[in-house]
Image (cartoon, coloured by chain):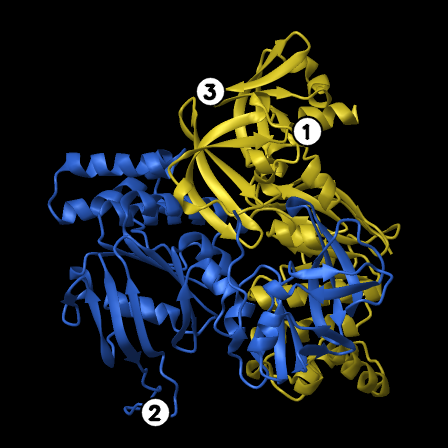
Amino acid sequence: MTITASRLTKRFGDKAAVDGVDFEVGESEFFVLVGPSGCGKTTTLRMIAGLESIDDGELRMNSVVVNETRPRDRDIAMVFQDYAIFPHLSVHENIAYGLRSRRLASSVIRQRVPDAAATFRIEHLLRRKPRQLSGGERQRVALARALVRDAQAYLYDEPLSNLDAQLRHQAREDILALHQRQRKPTVYVTHDQSEAMSMADRMAVMRSGRIEQVGTPRELYENPVSTFVAYFIGTPSINLFQATLRAEVEDVWLEAPAFSLRLPPSRARALAGHVGGPITAGIRPEDLHPPRQAPFEVGEHNTMTARVDLVEPTTAGSTVYATMPGPAGDLDVAASFGARLPDRFVGQEVPLAVDLEKVHLFDAVTERSVLVDARAA
Amino acid sequence: MRIRLADVTKRYLREGSLRVASDEPPALDHISLDIADGETVSVVGPSGCGKSTLLRLVAGLETADCGTVHYDEHDVADVAPQDRGIGMVFQDYALYPTMKGAGNLKYYFDVHRRTEDEARARAKEIADIMGVGFELLLGQQTTTLSGGEQQRVAIARCIVRDPTLFLMDEPIVNLDAKLRESTRMEMAKLLKRYGITTMFVTHDQQEAVFMGDRIALMRAGRVVQIGTFDELYYSPVNLFVATFFGSRPLAVLPATVADRTVRFGEAAWPLPAVLADRLEPGPVRIGVRPEAWRFAGAESGGGARMAVDRIESVPAERLTLAHGTVSGARVTVVAPAGTAGDVLWLTPDWEAATFFAADGEHALHTPGAPEFF
C-alpha cells in the first residue's frame, strides 16, 4: 500500500494547523514527520489515522480517497506517546483487544498474542496489569498490540518521548525490527531530529503547518533548502553568519567582521547573482577543525579565529563553544572536534579551519539556499 | 559559596502511617557531597532516584532525618529557605502571571526596597547576556509567552537576585529538543559569568555533561559515583554507571577468563598481559563501547561473529553504525565507512574495554580516559 497526501489541510478556528501539505509514503517506506512543537506534525498524523477530519485536500491509500473513511475501516495501527493501554486489562488482554474487536477466532488469538509478546520480550508479563510494569515494558505492550494486528499501515506519535536514553535506543531498534518484518508504509512523528535522522528512509521537516523539505536524512543534512532546515538538522546546530560576497579576479570571498574565506569554485559558480551583496553563510560545527587535524590544506583563506568559552567533552572528542566579534555584539560559534581540547584553552583565541567545500549559503532575505536552488534549476 | 552535605539520610512516612517503615528504602541514603565555590554539579539519575529530593533538601524545603548541610561554615539546619539566599528554577516556570516579564524581574527589588535604577541596571545587564530578543520578552505579559520564553524569564529572574546558590530542577525538560540546546547554552554562560555555585537536576545524561563541572549519578537514594565526564565514562565504578553514560548503548558480554584467555560464545581471545595479571579466572562481564571494537573484515573468521540487523549512517558524525547481535548479546558498533553485509567479525579493543564481576555489578577493571593530545 501507499499513502498519498495532496494539499492536506486542517484548520482550528481561523488558523491553519496543517496548511496544504503534500507527501507520499511508498510501499514499505519508513517516513518521518519532524519539526518543532506546534508545527502540525501530530495533526497530520491524526488526519491519516482518521482521528481528525480533513478540511481540505485529499488523503489516499493506494489510489482510493479515504477522507471520509472511518478510522477502523482504514486498517491502520497506531502507537501513542502515552501508550494508551487499558489499565484494567492484563497485558494479554491489551494485546488481544484489537483482534477480539475484529472478531477473530480465539484459536488465532491464542497463537498470535504470545508470538507478538515474544517479539518484544514481554511473554513473561502476559498476566500482569499495566500498573505493575515499568515505562519501557508498557511501551513494548503498546508495540505488541500494534504488531499483532497485521495492519495495512503503521503510525507512531512520539512513541519514545517518555523513555529514558537506554530504553529509547532499545525501543528504536524494536520499532525498526518490526518494520523490517512487516514492510508496511509507516509514518513516524517526532520533534527529535536525531531520532528522525537515525530511523527514516525519508523524512519531512515541518514548520508552521507546511512542509519545508522532504528527502533522505543525508539529503537534508547535506543540501538543506533553507536556513530553517539547516538549523533544525544536526546537533549542535549549524553556525549561521551574516556575511558579504566580494569578487576578486576569479575568486569569490565570503567576508564578515570576524573572517574572510575564499570560496572554492564549486561554491562560487552558483553565486553569480549574489556577488557584492549580503548572504547568510552556514557552517556546520563538524566542518570546523583544529588546523593540524583538518583533512585538507589549511591557509589564511580558510581559517577563522574564535575565543573559547566552553569545552563540552563528548565520546568522540569535544564540542567547543566559542565567540567571534560580530557587527552587533559577539557571535556564537560551535565546533565539533575529533579530539579533546584541553581546558587550558578556555578564554584563549584559537584558529578554526573551515571545510569550505561544505559551506552552505542562503539568500539573506528569503533564507532559501542559493546552492540547492541553483542545482534544482 | 561552598556546599557540604555530610551523611544525609531522609525517609518519607508511608501514607496513612505515623511510623517510618523500616523496610522502606530511604529517599536519600547516607549522602555526602562537597561542592566547591562557583562549581556546577549536575545531579542525574533515573526517575525516583531521589535527585529532586536532594535538591529540595539543600534548599531547605525538606529536612534531613540525620546528617548535616553546611553553606560555607554554617550549618543551615535552622535557617528558613527564604533566608538562605538561594535562587530556584523549576520545571514549571512559576512566573507571576499578572506581571509582564520586566515586572517579574523587578519584583524582588520592589519587595526589598531597592532603587528603581538598580533594578533596571541589573535587568539590562542580564538581558545583554540572554541574547537577541530577550528585551522584547520583558515587555510582554508572561501568559502570552511560549514555554521556552517563560523559562528564559524565570532563569533571568533568578539571576537578578544575585543568589549565592542556584538550584535548578529539570528547568528545560518541557522544551522541545532544539530549544533545549540553545537555552542550556544561555544558562551555562550565565553561570560561568557570575560564578554562582549551582546544583542542576536532570534525567538527561547529555544535559548533565554539558552543564556540570562534575556529575553526580544517583540511584535509589544513593550517589553511585561523582566525577567529571571522563571519570564516569572511562572509569565507571559499576555496570549501572557504565550503561547510564554514552549516547549509544554499551555492549555487555558474559564471558569466562581462564589460562590468560577470555572466552565469549564461540570466540576466544588471549588477554593482554596487563589484564591477564589483573583478572582472576572465572566468569566476568565485558563492557565494550560502540567505538571500541576492532574489525577483521566481513570474510575471515577472526574474533566474534556479529549478525547484523541494520546498518545506519550518521551523516552529522561522519559515522557508520552496525546494529545486531553477537552470541545473543545486543551490540551496536561504530563500523568502517562503506560496511555492508550481514556478518562482521569483531574483537574488543582491549585498551578500552571494561570488566565487571559476573555475580555483582562492580567494575574489576576500567580503561581510564584516552589521551586526546
Vertical relation: A92 (above or below) B267: below
Q: Which residue is mark 2?
A: B21
Q: Are marks 1 and 2 on the same chain?
A: no
Chain of the residue that carries numbered disc 3 in the rendered image: A
Subunit ID for the residue under disc 2: B
Q: Earlier in the sequence, mark 1 or mark 3?
A: 3
Estimate how packed mark 3 is, as few (under 14), some (14 to 19) or many (20 or more) residues with alpha carbons within 10 Å: few
Q: Residue at x 41, y 46 (%)?
A: A343
Chain coloured yellow in this rendering = A
Residue B250 at x, y percent in the picture: 62, 67
Left/right placement of residue A98 relative to residue A237 reads right
Q: Is residue B116 visible to the viewer in this orientation of the structure? A: yes
Q: CA distance from mark 1 to mark 2?
A: 66 Å
Q: Sort mark 1 into few (<14), some (14-19) or many (20+) by Cα contacts within 10 Å.
A: few
Q: In front here: B322 or B142?
A: B322
Where's the C terminus of chain A, which quadrant?
Answer: top right
Q: Colour of chain B?
A: blue
Q: Amino acid at mark 1?
A: Glu
- In the visual, does A359 lie left or right of A22? left
Disc 2 with disc 3 on a shared chain: no
Instruction: State the residue position of label 1.
Output: A357
Expressed as whole percent of the image width and height from the top left, the position of residue A108 reads: 85, 83
Residue that label 3 marks: A257
